[in-house]
Image (cartoon, grey):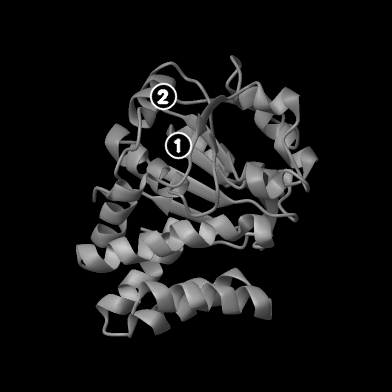
Amino acid sequence: MNIVEPIGLSEQHDNKEPWYLPTGQEVEVFEQCHARQLAVLLKGPTGCGKTRFVEYMAWRLGRPLITIACHDDLTASDLIGRFLVRHDGTQWQDGPLTRALREGAICYLDEVVEARQDTIVVLHPLADHRRTLPIDKTGETVAAAEGFQLVVSYNPGYQRMLKDLKPSTRQRFVGLDFDFPPLDQEVQIVSQEGGVDYANAHALVSLAVRLRALRDRGLAEVPSTRLLIAAARLIDSGIDPKLACQTAIVAPLSDDPTLGSAMRDLVDAMFI
């Protein structure tokens, strides 16, 4: 069941296993963090599998998952809750973070550094030994139910020159580093998720490896595994591979004519 709200919220309660291919010992480390009530920070480039990993771990641990997409306008009230005016008076409504605490859910804040600093500070008592959330508007202090876990993610490469987490925040989390998988594993992921054969999956990943080398030539964001899967799904639907790469990989990455031309040349060379 997915519920979409203005703050960018989704909830996962079903029992279907999300497909995830481990690339190291991240599953074991996360399981131990959950067992020992440790908050987790996932670091890695856009589209490298951080969100899918959290979905998989929530399924594996049998916990509901509440995901919040962070942004500049995200306030503490959006997370904690607020009083709503109704025909019969005012009524308090828990925010997603408070609901996760009460339900013992995994609460995942995606791209947490996009949120305002005064919002991030709200997470501090949840990410250390206290595991509590004071609600000033009601005078209540909510203690985390069994199974609650706080997980946040961000892209350090993109945010390094723009925003970053303060040390007082970072040191409350166990950090897991993510990156694009090794070539053979990424081929397997693209084939599985995109529905294409090994040859097309290998060509797409090989293209991505070359395009990722363009980062130093002005490409702000390199092609993610997510983009490769989108291209693979277009190919699987019958779209010509070159056109699929143009629309699903090249066009989303840059509007610069020179970079676009260089990327199209690589596509032409890869899909002869």
Q: Report the label total.
A: 2
In front: label 2 or label 1: 2
Rendered position, 102 above or below 158:
above
The residue tagged 1 is 106
The residue tagged 2 is 34
Residue drawn at (29%, 63%), measured in percent from left and top? 201
Can residue 86 be seen in this snapshot? Answer: no
Report the side of 127 relative to 25 (left or right). Answer: right
Q: Quadrant of the N terminus?
A: bottom left
Viewer-proximal residue, 24 or 216? 216
Disc assigned to residue 89: none
Q: Amino acid at mark 2?
A: His
Rendered position, 227 above or below 152:
below
Q: Are marks 2 and 1 in contact (CB under 8 Å)?
A: yes
Choose top left, top right, bottom left or bottom right for residue 167. top right
Report the side of 148 relative to 135 (left or right). Answer: left
